Image: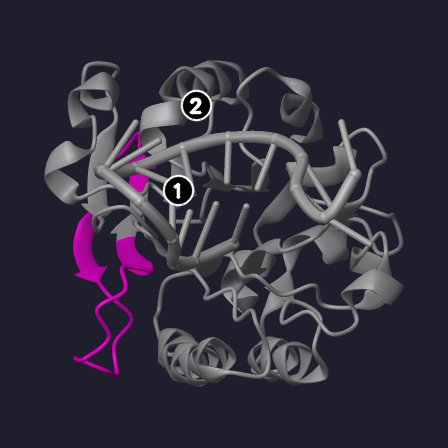
DNA sequence: ATGGTCGGGAACCGA
C-alpha cells in the first residue's frame, strides 16, 4: 500500500500534472492539499473515470484538502476536531483498506509574531489532541500532509534566512516534536537519517535552480504503521516540470497487514 | 531593477 502527500497549489492549474504523476507513481492513497476550490468545483469526474474514490473538504479560493484512493474511503471526518468555529478547510481523515489516514494542511503562520502565528500554534495543539486519540485506533495510522514546519535546520537550505520564519520558529518545532514524541515515526527521516532532502522550493528568486528548498511535507506513522514500512521517498524531479507545484509528492510504502 | 513568482479570480490576498 503506497500512501502519498502532495500539496498541489490549486487543482485547476495542476490537474494535468497531477494525472501524469498518478500514472507514473501509482500510489494507492493520496492526500492533496491546497486544492483551492469549493467541493462542488473539484473535478471529481477526472479521477472517478480513472477508478479513483474521491473525498474533498474544500473552500473557495484558499486552503482545501482531498483524499484520492484506489479503494473505498470510509468513516470520513472533515475538519480538525476540537473547534467548531474554525472555518478553514485544512483537515480530512478516512479509513482505507484497514489503514487510517489523516490528511492535513497546517497553517503557514507568517507573519510572526501575529494572529496567524497564534492560529498556527493553536491548530497544532488541537492536532496533537487528535493525533493522541488516533494512537488509540486499532488500525495503523498515517498523518500525512503539508505541515509547514521544518523540523530542524538540516531541513532548510538557508537556515540563516529562515530563522524568524514561522516554519522554522522554535515554537513550531517544539509543537511538531511534541506530536512526534507521542510515538510517531517520521517516515522520511527514518528511511534517510542524514540526507539533505527538501519537498518545497519557492517560485521566487530561482529557488529551485539554486536548490534553496525546505522539507515541510511529512508522513508520520503510528507504531503499527511504522512496523509495516518497507520504503519511503520524495518525487523531487517533477518540480522541474512546466506548471509544477511549488511542492513535490512524498510517499511511503507499507507492507500488507498480516491476517 | 528597492523587485523578484505563482494561483485564485477578477483587486488583491495568501504563500
Element under disc 2? helix
Tell me which label, 1 or 2, sits earlier in the chain: 2
Q: What element carries label 1?
A: strand
Characterize the local packing of mark 1: few (<14), some (14-19) or many (20 or more) Cα atoms within 10 angstroms: many
Residue A160 figure quarter: bottom right
Compare residues A250 and A253 and report the one nearer the observer: A250
Q: Which residue is drawn at 46% across and 76% down?
A: A116
On what subunit does the disc labeled 1 rest?
A
Q: Residue at x 59, y 59 (%)?
A: A226
Q: In this view, does A248 lie above or below A173?
A: above
| Residues at circles 1 and 2 in contact by the CB criterion of under 8 Å | yes
Asked whether A26 or A239 is in front, the reply is A239
Q: Residue at x 49, y 40 (%)?
A: A6
Is residue A117 shown above or below A157? below
Query: What x and y, as percent, mark residue A174?
Result: 66, 84
Q: Quadrant of residue A68?
A: top left
Which residue is label 2 attached to? Answer: A18
Magenta span contains residue A87: yes
* Highlighted magenta segment, given as a residue range: A67-94
CA–CA distance in space, label 1 to label 2:
10 Å
Amino acid at each position: 500500500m503506497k500512501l502519498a502527500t502532495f500539496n498541489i497549489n490549486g487543482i485547476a492549474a495542476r490537474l494535468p500534472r497531477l494525472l501524469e504523476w498518478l500514472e507514473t507513481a501509482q500510489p494507492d492513497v493520496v492526500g492533496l492539499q491546497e486544492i483551492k476550490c469549493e467541493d462542488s468545483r473539484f473535478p471529481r469526474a477526472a479521477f472517478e473515470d480513472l477508478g479513483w474514490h474521491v473525498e474533498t473538504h474544500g473552500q473557495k479560493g484558499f486552503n482545501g484538502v482531498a483524499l484520492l484512493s484506489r479503494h473505498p474511503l470510509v468513516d470520513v471526518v472533515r475538519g480538525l476536531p476540537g473547534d467548531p468555529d474554525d472555518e478553514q478547510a485544512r483537515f480530512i481523515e478516512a479509513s482505507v483498506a484497514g489503514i487510517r489516514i489523516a490528511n492535513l494542511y497546517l497553517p503557514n503562520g507568517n507573519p510572526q509574531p501575529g494572529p496567524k502565528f497564534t492560529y498556527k500554534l493553536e491548530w497544532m495543539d488541537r492536532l496533537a489532541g487528535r493525533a493522541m486519540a488516533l494512537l488509540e485506533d486499532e488500525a495503523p495510522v498515517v498523518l500525512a500532509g503539508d505541515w509547514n514546519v521544518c523540523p530542524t535546520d538540516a531541513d532548510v537550505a538557508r537556515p540563516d534566512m529562515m530563522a524568524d520564519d514561522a516554519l522554522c520558529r522554535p515554537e513550531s518545532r517544539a509543537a511538531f516534536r511534541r506530536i512526534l514524541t507521542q510515538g510517531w515515526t517520521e517516515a522520511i527521516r527514518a528511511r534517510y537519517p542524514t540526507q539533505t532532502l527538501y519537498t518545497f522550493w519557492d517560485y521566487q528568486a530561482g529557488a529551485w535552480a539554486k536548490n534553496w528548498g525546505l522539507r515541510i511535507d511529512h508522513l508520520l506513522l503510528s507504531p503499527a504503521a511504522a512496523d509495516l514500512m518497507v520504503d519511503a521517498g520524495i518525487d523531487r524531479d517533477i518540480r522541474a516540470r512546466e506548471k509544477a507545484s511549488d511542492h513535490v509528492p512524498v510517499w511511503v510504502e507499507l507492507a500488507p497487514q498480516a491476517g
